[in-house]
Every structure is written in C-alpha cells, then in structure tokens.
Image: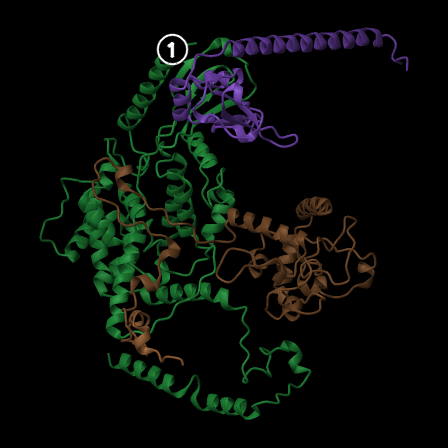
C-alpha cells in the first residue's frame, strides 16, 4: 500500500508498553506508536523504542526499568504524545511525573490485602491455641485420646 | 496533566541530584587509602591531589621498570588465534624496534587512577507514605539517554515503602553493566573477587590477572574496587611477592599505597636485595613527598647512598626487616642470583606449559622411555628402519661433548671463562 | 534437543551427587591402589559409566595409567570417529553418548564419555585446557574435538565457570583511562588508546616501501593513437 503520510511526523503519537517476551517470560518495551488512525497493531509500526521494563524481579528482588529520558521529553514535550496508564505509572514511580492515582489505589489495595492476611493468620493462630488448650484440658483427665 | 507540571517537576529533580554529587566529592573526612592502625595521622590528606602531583608521578614512573619480555608483552591467552610474526633485521634496526616497543610498553603501564571511593550513602529524593506496599519488590530506574556517560548516568530506586532515592554505587555500576555490556564484564562480580578463589589465584601468582580484571570490571572509584585492590596489595606485602607486580600498571598504585601507610621497609629490602640503590632512594623520596615531615627532609644535593643511609639511621625500628639492604650497603653483596633464577624459571615454565603437548621424538630417544612406547620400550625392542646411523652418531657425539653441539658448547665455555676472568 | 536438555539435567544431578559424595569420602586412594584403568568386568557389566569425584579425577590424570594411555597428548588426539572420508565432510556430531538411563548409546563413545574418570569440571582446568585452541581461551571446533554435543556444551559451561573462578586465566582487555575524567586538575591529553592484541610488529617497524620494477612490454605504446590512426597502421585487407 502506498503511504500517504509519514507515520513519524503525522498526528498524535502515543507511548505505551509493547509485550515482547516469550512463553512464561513477560518483557516489555516502552515504545512510541504512531497516530491511532495509522494503527499500532504490528511490531513494524513502532516508531521508536524509548525504554524497557522487566516485570519479573531479579535475584536481588528488583524490577528493572530503563528509560531514555531525553527522547521521552521530546515525544512528550514537543510532540504532545499520549501516554498510556502503565507508562504513566512507571514515569510516576521514577519521579519524572507526579505519581499516578492508580499507583495509590494499588498500594491501598495491597495494604488492605496484607492487613487481611495478617488478621487471618492471627485468627488462625488464636484458634490453634484454643484447640490445643482445649485438648490439654480435655486430655489431662483422660490420658487416652479418642482415636 | 499538562506540560507545565512536568517541566517543573523535572527541574526540581535535576539540581537536587547534581548538588548531591558535588557534595560527595568535597566533604570528606579521612582517606580510605590510609589505614588508621598503621600511623597516627589524623590530618586530612587529599590523596587524589597527591597522586597527580608532577614529582609523585615521576617517581612512580621511575620505580616501575619496564620488562618487555616477561611482563608487558608476555604471552597471554587471547580470544582469537594469532600468528607469530618474524622479521629479519639488522642490529641497528633491531635496536630501533626495541626502542619503539619500549615506547608502546610505556602506554601499557599507564597507572590505574587512585581515587577515593564514592560515598555509600544515598539521598532520599521523595517520600510517599501513601505509596507503601505498592509492590513487593524495588523498582530501579536507569536513564539510558544516549549522551549520558557511565559516571553521570542517573539511576534512582523506588523502595517498596514508597521512598524514592538515588542508587548506591553498587546498584549504579550494576545497572551500567546490565545495560551496557562489554566482554568479560558480567553483571555480577565473578567469584574470583571473593575469598576462597581469590586466595587460590594469588597462590598461583596470578596477581596481575586479578588486578587487571578488577580494574576492567569495576570503576576506579568503586568502594569494592578500592577494598579489593587494598586486600591484594596487603597480601603481596605480607608474602613478599613483589616480583609479581613489578613492571605492571598496578605497581604505581601499589607503591603509592605503601608509601601512604608508612609500610615501605619490605619493598625497600626487595630493591636492596637486587642492589638497586636508585630505586631505594626514589622510594624514600616518594615517601617523603607523600608524607612531608619537617624534621627529616632530603637536601637537594644528597647522593642516593646518603639518602638511604639517612633513612636507615632515622628508622632504626625497621632494622630487622631490611637485612638484605643492609647487607648490600655494608658489604656490597647482592642476593639476586637465586631469585633471578627462580623468576626466569617460573616464566619459562609458564610458556612451556602451552608447548608441552607437542611430543619431541628424535632418533636419540625413540628407543627410550621418552619415545612413543614409553614404559613398554623396556619389554619390546624398537626397530628404526630409516636413518639407522644418525642416532648412533648422535649418541657418540653426546658422549664426546657432554651436551649440545660443538659451537654452542664452545660459546658456553668461552662465556664461563670470561666470567672467571672477571 | 529435548533429549539433550534432559541428559544435561541428569548430568547436573549426577555432579551434585558427586559433590555430596565428596564430603563423606575425603581420602583419595593412590592411583595404583585404586586400580585405575583396569577393566573390572563386574563393574562394567551394566554398561554404566561409574561416578568419580573431582579429586579422583585429578589424581587419575596424574597417574601412570593416564600417562600410558594418552602419552601426554590431549585426549581427543587418540580418538577417531568411525567415518569414511574427509573429516570436513563427516556427519554432524552426536547429541549424546550416554542416554538418560545412564547407559552407553554408542559403541564408540566420545573421548570424554568413554573414559570413566573424565568429565569437565572447572576445578580441573588441565582437562579443559586440552580442548582450547592454541594460545586462546576459546574451545576448538566440535568436529575437531570429536565430542558429543552434550559434552561440548558442558565444556563451554565449565570453561566459563573456570574463567570466573580464576582457574583458567586469559588476557583481559586493556582499559585506557582518561585522567582528565578522573582528576579535575589533570590537563594533559591522554595518549592514543592501546589494546592488547593491537601491537603488531608491522606497525611498530613498517617495512620500507620498496618499488620493484616490473617488465612492461608496451611501456611507450599509446593504444589510443593506435585506434585513432588505425587506418595508417593496420594493413589494408584486400
């Protein structure tokens, strides 16, 4: 098909994550995609790669993110690129942007989950204690336990 | 979210980081290169300034002798196979070539910079208590902008509790190694740099290899590098293995380290055992330059012998450590003969290891244990069909002349006689 | 390839077994006492390759039995694959010699698989060094070494490990420092960057440019003139 426009200089580009891993090994590239009208479905359509994100933590429990801040500034500042939410979250965590609301929501959810689990474990421990106490109190007079 | 907020937040971040780096270079209490136990100097010494001083550099360069064959251009394992080159040249041309090789070797002896280690402390850039537990693991952000160098690259870490901080030197360099790969520079430091294997390598006299690799792997101002090189220097000094590090690029920093710590008598003794008085004098001069003391100074016109004698007089406590030097100064006796032999033997052995797989079977030893039949040659007779006579003749010659061909033998004898005359 | 992966995993398990065994049996019997290189039929009845610790391997490689078997040459020099014709045209290397049950898959196993004491390990660099190309730290071609793919993979893995543990040394790249970058007060330009393999005799002492005269028969012939004034030179055909 003949190209009527140059995708690099046409419309409003967007920055997003492109999943480029293999089975059971996710790996993301932070990429600049062309205008929505030109489609961002194919790998060949990617205009530029401006970073990587490795969602699996390494041996030292770190998730590695590499960002080409110089090019990001160009795409955001001069070309007014649209930024997808996951990238906004990453940029927020990196300190370039204000932190994205979604990160706060995620943090809140996680804290709630952890608190829940702690409650559960405390309750379980208490129950277990109770059971042992009951067993002790019931087992002391009669030495042979049923079963 | 508009662009104005972005610009302001970026502007906020940048000057903070740069101010921090400047601070880290200026505010410094005491040097990591000076061990507190060795001397009781509490005053501030700027070792970086001291190291690049003109006279200190000159003394270090003079102390590092250039051994082309056994050290600088000694055979090393390379990654590709190379042919050996041969050239037929006149004596004059050979001398010229040697001179140019020496020039080339001087470039290979460029010292590794002696730097204060970077500070381990990190700066907290932002604290968001709301962000606590947003993830179970840390996030490390690396700036891969094209024109950022390894030294000024920005690396920040977002902790799971929501604080944003700059990376410590270890993380910073690890990220450099991850995103900018070089051959023989893996991401994590190899086990060779930690102890059981380090000691094994040092026992095999591979000090130069370890130091070379560590300066390729680490940055010179990495705290781990400073620690590792000091460890190796200390072990060299303890075991008196100075010959492994002479005429390498690490000798400069080694001597500088010893001079800083007032620890030179063993090295002085080493130079003395070879009768190298000028090196001894240079070493003493270096120590006086590094640790100026108004009570004991060297006058401009002092001869080398006087410098050394003065030093011995002033430091009577080292007397038992510098036996060879005293022996040389008082009696003019040099201990070097045995040591030299040992050294050259070691080198020859190292080269020989590569060649040994080529079996050398000549007509003389084909019948013996060294021949293809080895031990079986005692059971089975070896019959050589071709050139039966040559072996016999060889044997006869050997009986006659002891060893080697006549011309070589006579030359050997001549040299021996010359020595006797001397 | 799946089979190779499986067999490598099996080998790893075996080596970990070896490690575990070493702790228990510290003493290594002398080679003659241990009966190295004697064909104890009852041991080999099951066609299995016995497991030995690395200390045993090292003492075997120093023993007389080893010296007599290999005569000081690298072990692959005593091995010839059973092929007809040029070595260049041989079929691809075998994937493995010992299958997942630990039995020999072939009659003529590769030089490492066939010797019961030998396996690659970074703690015994002398075996790995036999398979390095002369003067380099790279392994030789797999077809030249005659190894099976499994052993060749293990060779490369153990070679890397040996380098990282310092048992095999190599020429590290020379790092050129620009002192201006490290010291603020330094103003001198750094010299030309050098590299370890970059020193050539040819560069240090270039051959003088000698002009060798060549014989040129038509030196003064201007062939343009020949064609321009062709009719004058050429004989007219009748």
The residue shown at (37%, 83%) is: B408
Q: Colour of chain C?
A: brown
Q: Which chain is green?
A: B
The residue shown at (35%, 36%) is: B221
Residue on which the image places disc 1:
B5
Front one among C32 and A39? A39
- Quadrant of the rendered structure where residue A39 is? top right
Q: Position of residue B50 (x, y in %)?
A: 22, 39
Q: Position of residue B64 (x, y in %)?
A: 28, 54
Give the residue furthest to the left: B301
Which quarter shows the N terminus of chain B? top left
Q: At numbered mark 1, what does the secondary structure look like: helix, strand or loop?
A: helix
Q: Which chain is purple?
A: A
Which quarter shows the C terminus of chain B? bottom left
Q: Position of residue B17 (x, y in %)?
A: 34, 21
Using the image, determine if residue B357 lies above or below residue B264: below
What count of labels does the image hold?
1
């Amino acid at each position: 098909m003949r190209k009527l426009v140059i995708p690099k200089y046409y419309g409003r580009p967007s920055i997003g994550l492109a999943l480029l891993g293999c089975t059971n090994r996710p790996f993301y590239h932070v990429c600049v995609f062309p205008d929505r009208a030109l489609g961002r479905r194919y790998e060949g359509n990617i205009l530029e790669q401006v970073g990587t994100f490795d969602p699996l933590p390494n041996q030292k429990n770190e998730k590695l993110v590499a960002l080409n801040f110089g090019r990001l500034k160009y795409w955001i500042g001069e070309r007014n690129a649209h930024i997808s939410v996951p990238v906004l979250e990453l940029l927020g965590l990196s300190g370039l942007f204000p932190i994205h609301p979604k990160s706060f929501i995620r943090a809140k959810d996680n804290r709630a989950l952890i608190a829940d689990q702690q409650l559960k474990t405390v309750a379980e421990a208490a129950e277990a204690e109770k059971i042992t106490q009951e067993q002790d109190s019931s087992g002391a007079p009669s030495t042979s336990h049923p079963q | 979210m508009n662009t104005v907020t972005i610009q302001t937040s970026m502007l906020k971040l940048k000057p903070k980081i740069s101010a921090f780096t400047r601070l880290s270079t200026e505010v410094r209490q005491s040097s990591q290169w000076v061990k507190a136990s060795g001397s009781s100097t509490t005053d501030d010494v700027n070792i970086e300034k001291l190291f690049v001083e003109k006279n200190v550099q000159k003394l270090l360069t003079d102390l590092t002798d250039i051994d082309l064959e056994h050290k600088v251009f000694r055979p090393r394992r390379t990654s590709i196979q190379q042919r050996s080159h041969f050239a037929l040249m006149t004596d004059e041309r050979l001398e010229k070539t040697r001179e140019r090789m020496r020039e080339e070797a001087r470039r290979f002896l460029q010292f590794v910079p002696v730097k204060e280690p970077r500070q381990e402390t990190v700066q907290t850039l932002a604290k968001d208590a709301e962000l606590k537990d947003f993830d179970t693991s840390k996030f490390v952000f690396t700036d891969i902008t094209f024109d950022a160098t390894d030294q000024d690259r920005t690396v920040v870490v977002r902790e799971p509790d929501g604080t944003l901080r700059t990376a410590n030197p270890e993380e910073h360099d690890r990220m450099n190694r991850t995103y900018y790969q070089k051959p023989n520079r893996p991401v994590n430091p190899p086990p060779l740099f930690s102890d059981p294997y380090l000691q094994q390598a040092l026992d095999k006299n591979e000090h130069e290899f370890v130091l070379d690799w560590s300066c390729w792997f680490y940055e010179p101002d990495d705290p781990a590098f400073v620690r590792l090189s000091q460890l190796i220097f200390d072990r060299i000094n303890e075991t008196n293995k100075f010959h492994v590090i002479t005429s390498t690029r690490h000798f400069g920093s080694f001597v500088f380290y010893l001079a800083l710590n007032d620890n030179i008598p063993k090295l002085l003794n080493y130079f003395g055992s070879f009768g190298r008085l000028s090196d001894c004098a240079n070493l003493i001069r270096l120590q006086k330059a590094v640790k100026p003391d108004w009570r004991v100074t060297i006058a401009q016109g002092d001869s080398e012998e006087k410098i050394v004698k003065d030093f011995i007089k002033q430091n009577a406590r080292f007397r038992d450590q510098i036996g060879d030097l005293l022996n040389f100064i008082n009696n003019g006796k040099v201990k070097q003969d045995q040591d030299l032999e040992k050294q050259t033997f070691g080198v020859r052995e190292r080269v020989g290891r590569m060649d040994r797989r080529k079996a050398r079977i000549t007509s003389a030893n084909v019948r013996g244990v060294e021949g293809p039949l080895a031990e079986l040659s005692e059971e089975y007779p070896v019959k050589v069909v071709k050139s039966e006579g040559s072996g016999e003749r060889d044997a006869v010659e050997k009986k006659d002349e002891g060893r080697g061909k006549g011309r070589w033998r006579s030359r050997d004898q001549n040299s021996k006689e010359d020595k006797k005359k001397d | 390839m799946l089979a190779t992966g499986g067999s490598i995993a099996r080998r790893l398990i075996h080596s970990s077994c070896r490690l575990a065994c070493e702790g228990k049996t510290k003493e290594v019997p002398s080679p003659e006492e241990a009966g190295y290189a004697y064909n104890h039929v009852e041991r080999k009845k099951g066609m299995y390759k016995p497991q030995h610790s690395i200390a045993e391997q090292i003492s075997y490689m120093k023993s007389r039995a080893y010296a007599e078997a290999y005569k000081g040459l690298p072990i692959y020099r005593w091995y010839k694959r059973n092929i007809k014709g040029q070595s260049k045209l041989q079929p691809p290397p075998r994937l493995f010699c010992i299958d997942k049950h630990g039995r020999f898959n072939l009659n003529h196993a590769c030089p490492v698989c066939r010797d019961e004491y030998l396996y690659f390990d970074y703690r015994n660099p002398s075996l790995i060094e036999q398979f390095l190309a002369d003067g380099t730290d790279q392994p030789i071609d797999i077809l030249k070494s005659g190894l099976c793919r499994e052993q060749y993979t293990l060779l490369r893995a153990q070679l890397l490990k040996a380098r990282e543990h310092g048992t095999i040394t190599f020429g590290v790249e020379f790092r050129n420092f620009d002192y201006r970058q490290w010291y603020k007060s330094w103003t001198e330009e750094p010299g030309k960057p050098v590299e370890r393999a970059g020193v050539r005799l040819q560069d240090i002492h270039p051959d003088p440019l000698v002009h060798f005269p060549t014989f040129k028969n038509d030196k003064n012939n201007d062939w343009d003139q020949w064609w321009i004034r062709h009719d004058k030179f050429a004989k007219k055909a009748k």
